[in-house]
Image (cartoon, rainbow, N blue to C red):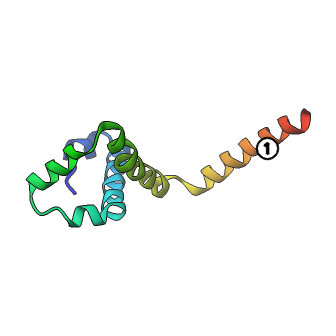
């Protein structure tokens, strides 16, 4: 994984996300990556996806992977609980 040092120095949170997302590609797409032997094969694979397919099958899962490992668990639990409380209060009121 290679990420710009400039990004690491200027936007550390984006840098962390980028690293986590690239690890996500390694974990989630291991079978695809293991089949690539040359840069030409990598380019051919990339070009074989249409834009939506690439976005939803390749980038989307890697982004969710990164978010999952970087998200602070306690804050997520608190926010989820608050949303559910509000939602159930609205249901109870109707």
Q: Is residue 84 left or right of residue 33?
A: right
Viewer-proximal residue among 28 and 41: 41
Q: Residue at x 36, y 55 (%)?
A: 20
Q: Residue furthest top?
A: 94
| Residue count near mark 1 (Cα–Cα under 10 Å), binned few <14, some 14–19, many ≥20 | few
Q: Residue at x 8, y 52 (%)?
A: 40
Residue 17 point in image, percent of width and height: 37, 49
Quarter of the image that includes the C terminus: top right
Residue 56 point in image, percent of width and height: 40, 44
Quarter of the image that includes the N terminus: bottom left
Q: Secondary structure at mark 1?
A: helix
Residue 50 point in image, percent of width and height: 29, 39
Q: Residue furthest right?
A: 93
Q: Is residue 47 left or right of residue 88?
A: left
Q: Residue at x 62, y 55 (%)?
A: 74
Residue marked by disc 1 = 85
Residue 16 point in image, percent of width and height: 35, 51
Q: Is residue 21 left or right of residue 88?
A: left
Q: Residue at x 72, y 49 (%)?
A: 81
């Amino acid at each position: 994984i290679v990420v710009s040092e400039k990004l690491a120095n200027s936007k550390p949170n984006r840098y962390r996300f980028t690293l986590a997302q690239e690890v996500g590609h390694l974990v989630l797409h291991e079978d695809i990556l293991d089949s690539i032997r040359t840069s030409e094969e990598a380019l051919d694979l990339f070009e074989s996806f249409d834009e939506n397919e690439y976005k939803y099958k390749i980038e989307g899962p890697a982004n969710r992977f990164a978010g999952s490992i970087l998200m602070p668990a306690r804050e997520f639990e608190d926010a989820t609980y608050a949303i559910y409380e509000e939602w159930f209060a609205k249901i109870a009121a109707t």
